[in-house]
Image (cartoon, grey):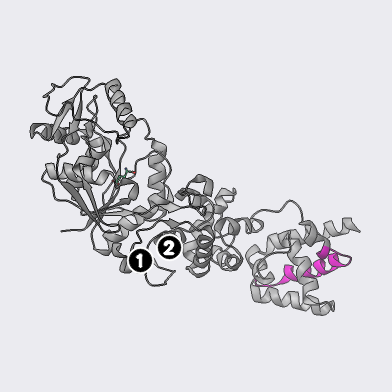
Amino acid sequence: MTVTTRFAPSPTGYLHVGGARTALFSWLYARKHGGKFILRIEDTDLERSTQESVDAILDGMAWLSLNSDNERPFFQTEHFPRYKEIIAQLLADGHAYYCDCSKEELETLREQQMAAKEKPRYNGKCRDANKPQSDKTVVRFKTPLDGAITIPDLVKGEITVANKELDDLVIARADGSPTYNLTVVVDDMDMQITHVIRGDDHINNTPRQINILNALNAPLPQYAHLPMILGADGARLSKRHGAVSVMQFRDEGYLPEALLNYLVRLGWSHGDQEIFSIDEMIEYFDLADVNGAASTFNMEKLLWLNHHYLMHSDPARIVPHLVWHLGQLGIDAKQEEVDLIELVKAQRERCKTLVDMAAASVYFYHDFDGYEEKSAKKAFVEGSDNVLAKLEEAFSHVPTWEAEALHDIVKNVAAQLELGLGKVAQPLRVAICGSGVSPSIDVTLSLLGRDKTLARLQRAISHIQTLA
Ligand code: GLU
């Protein structure tokens, strides 16, 4: 049987990192077994589902390259006739019944149960009452009265729940629309899902879903419930801990491979290895190695991984991400203007994120407003205009604009003026970058190009002359 997994988000918010980890584990499991991975959008809650969230989920999955095997995303709202068919079947087979208990009646029951310190649950009043259908009736599933459901959970171990702990859940609302537990069961059955990998917030639903699957004589999938992700303070990870949506990590300058590597290690391990290529993840991943306890999100480690991937990835892979971030700063980065591969190579050592890298690269594209005060004060002193004028002269005549030749010019000017290299390089750096921080001066010059270099030297010379 083909291993088939699914990621089934409800489009009621952004794609949370917890959801992304669930998606990653499901995707890895399918890929490892040469199986199928399905993306299913659970949008039956019409009030809470939004197109914006659907887009955020699709964008997040695409950014992480967690490709699904369905040609286009599956939307539950497109399958109402199928859910109705199954509800009718369950009714016909005596596994479900109409219930006309009113809201008030159910509320009173709840209050009584709470007062008696009992677990609030439906008392089965309509179960054998043969109520006819009306516009006020919901459909309830007949949960078996005896016995128990045992879930051999692949992460949590065996979980057993007695059926008497469960009540007769609503599977269709009064307007005929199906509820969450029904749609999940129908889709998992129809899609022949072999492994349901999801957050452990769904553990309570699992025995109910198994009861419905049994009533439909459907084979049971295997279940793997993933523990939750906590913030550093031990509370469930949420917005107040910082970025939690996948797209926010993109916006904050993380590479998708760094986030994936970070997520795979949240609750899963393979010896003490920390860095995993996607191929290694696929090769080594196993649900048996997922830890049943909650894991804590550690931003520092993610940042460390991001820097690792910036340093060690093929620069050509980083370029499109850098271009996107430059675009966010209003820069249309074209290869003809600045060699992007060389730019990545020059910047990556000192940048932990792509946001840092883009910010540190602005001067290659746009003239800066003014000079950073401290560096300018140190670098632009009496005589610096002369140093810069000498450089300008030599740069305007150099036949090839290449790092080596440019380096020689800086060295020669220093020698000619009997100055240390720093006394030449530093005013030059501030003149062309606006501050005292840049990649090595020859690389910076070669990336910047002759025209911008000469114009900026001119500008600095005039500036220094106004100081005198
Ligand atoms: N739609 C559910 C959610 O977003 C997940 C359902 C499932 O994985 O079974 O929480």
Q: Which residue is mark 1?
A: 281
The single residue placed furthest to the left in the displayed view is 93
Determine whether the residue tagged by mark 2 lies in a helix, strand or loop.
helix
For mark 2, what is the residue? 261
Tell me if 307 is positioned left or right of 383 in this view.
left
Q: Residue at x 35, y 56 (%)?
A: 24
Residue segment shown in magenta: 378-401
The picture places residue 430, in percent across and down from the top left corner, at: 75, 62
> Which of pointers 1 and 2 lies earlier in the amino acid sequence?
2
What element does badge 1 sit on? Answer: helix
Task: Pick the residue in front: 154 or 198.
Answer: 154
Is residue 117 highlighted in magenta?
no
Q: Residues within 10 Å of mark 1 (few under 14, many from 20)?
A: many
Magenta span includes 386: yes
On screen, residue 455 versus residue 404, left or right, reads right
Rendering coords of residue 159 (x, y %): 25, 53
User: Residue placed farthest to the right in the image?
Assistant: 468
Within 10 Å of disc 2 (Cα), the crowding (few <14, some 14-19, many 20+) is many
Q: Which mark is residue 464?
A: none
Q: Residue 370 at x, y = what percent?
A: 76, 53
**What type is the residue that disc 1 sits on?**
Met
Along the viewing direction, whichever of 343 and 268 lies nearer the viewer: 268
Please tell me whether the stretch drawn in magenta is mainly helix, strand or loop. helix
* CA distance for labels 1 and 2: 8 Å
Q: Is residue 185 visible?
A: yes
Label pair 1/2, CB-CB below 8 angstroms: yes
Q: Is residue 58 above or below residue 91?
A: below
Residue 151 sits above or below residue 90 on the image: below
Q: Give 411 or 198, whichever is nearer the viewer.
A: 198
Picture residue at 26% right of the left edge, 34% below the top = 179
* Quadrant containing ligand 1: top left
Res 3 → quadrant: bottom left
